[in-house]
Amino acid sequence: MVVYLPRGGSRSYVDDKVSYADCVDGDLFSLLELNAMLKDLGYVKKVPMWYHFRAPDSDLYFGLHDLATHSDVRFLDLCV
């Protein structure tokens, strides 16, 4: 999924493809697990990838959070 982030304009989703994984154990989830899940979904890491998630009840301006460290993964687990 791609989010378009224009300068001074409104943010919006521009790619309608959504992939998801179900039954993820929050106690065992990690960035290594995320990379493995994305590989299983067919995403190939040919270019650098950055992960973000939108916190519940938030918008694309203030609700996007980095998913780059173990602490970020713990915060994601609290949100879902």
Image: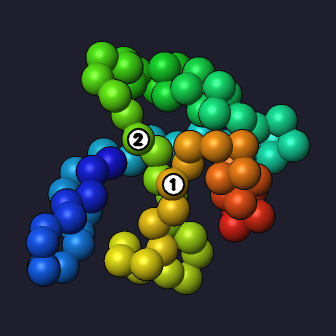
Q: Which mark is residue 22?
A: none
Residue shown at the point (81%, 41%) measured from the top left: 25
Q: Element type at marker 2?
A: loop
* Residue under numbered circle 2: 50
* Residue under numbered circle 1: 66
Q: Write down the quadrant of residue 68 in the picture.
A: top right
* Identity, as a three-letter code, of the amino acid under mark 2: Trp
Q: From mark 2 to mark 1, how far is it between C-alphas? A: 8 Å
Label 2 close to label 1 by CB (< 8 Å): yes
Can residue 16 be seen in this snapshot? no
Q: Where is residue 22 in the image (x, y as percent from the top left)?
A: 66, 43
* Neighbours of disc 2 within 10 Å: few (<14), some (14-19), many (20+): few
Residue shown at the point (13%, 80%) measured from the top left: 8
Q: Where is residue 45 in the image (x, y as percent from the top left)?
A: 37, 20
Considering only vertical position in the picture, is 20 above or below 43? below
Q: Position of residue 20 (x, y in %)?
A: 52, 43
Q: Which residue lies furthest to the right in this view?
A: 27
Can residue 75 be seen in this snapshot? yes
Q: Element type at marker 1?
A: strand
Residue shown at the point (52%, 20%) measured from the top left: 40
* Identity, as a three-letter code, of the amino acid under mark 1: Asp
The answer to whether 14 appears left or right of 34 in the picture is left
Q: Position of residue 10 (x, y in %)?
A: 18, 79
Could you tell which of marks 2 and 1 lies nearer the N-terminus? 2
The answer to whether 24 appears left or right of 14 in the picture is right
Q: In which quarter of the image is the C terminus?
A: bottom right
Residue shown at the point (35%, 77%) measured from the top left: 61
